[in-house]
Image (spheres, helix red, strand yellow):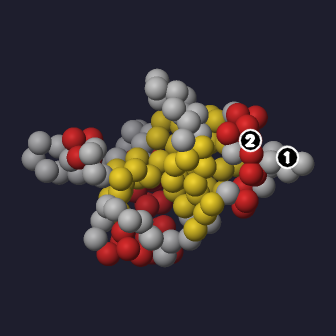
Amino acid sequence: MDILICKIKYPNDTSGKIVPHQHFVGCYEEGILELYSISSITGKEYKVYDKEGMPNPTYYLIIGSECTLCNLKVPSFIDCAKSYMLNITDNMDINKLGHRGIPKEIVEKIKNKIKETKDNGSHVQYTISSGDFVTYNTICKIK
């Protein structure tokens, strides 16, 4: 599971919108899930590229053949500067959420970009409430 589709109430989003969204799974071990937002580039070019056309150094761009290999319909980016941590509890099964794998070599490139972003001190980690997560993603709740 490299891409997970779920609803999250982002602590850093003032709009408060809670909609299904694709996330890159940065880590899934020892009861912890670390997610990174995947967004389409279209309409967000101003965030993705600077005035000279250079990409934001904390974003991993999924463009060209990588877009196809990752089964994404449009060129996208992963914000490697913000992660969302979730403690997996006994009452949830993450595998019930929509998910898919992507090629290992692309996973490694994304993880290298995340590490580089962390090493540069440009990384912020947010915590997601397990209770809220189950409320917004009822399909993963174990009854």
Amino acid at the residue labelled 1 = Asn
**Residue 30 x %, y %:** 75, 54
**Residue 94 x %, y %:** 72, 55
Q: Residue at x 30, y 65 (%)?
A: 63
The residue wearing badge 1 is 91
The residue wearing badge 2 is 134
Residue projecting furthest to the top? 14
Q: Residue at x 42, y 43 (%)?
A: 81
Q: Residues within 10 Å of mark 2 (few under 14, many from 20)?
A: many
| Image-based side of 51 in relation to 18, left or right | left
Asked which secondary structure carries label 1, the reply is loop
Indicate which disc residue 120 carries: none
Label 2, label 1: how many angstroms apart (C-alpha)?
8 Å
Marks 2 & 1, CB-CB < 8 Å contact:
yes
Q: Residue at x 27, y 45 (%)?
A: 43
Quarter where residue 130 is shown? top right
**Residue 127 x %, y %:** 62, 34
Q: Residue at x 48, y 36 (%)?
A: 124
- Viewer-nearest residue: 77 or 126: 77
| Image-based side of 138 in relation to 35, left or right | right
- Viewer-nearest residue: 87 or 11: 11
Say which label, 2 or 1, has the lower sequence index.
Answer: 1
Asked which secondary structure carries label 2, the reply is helix
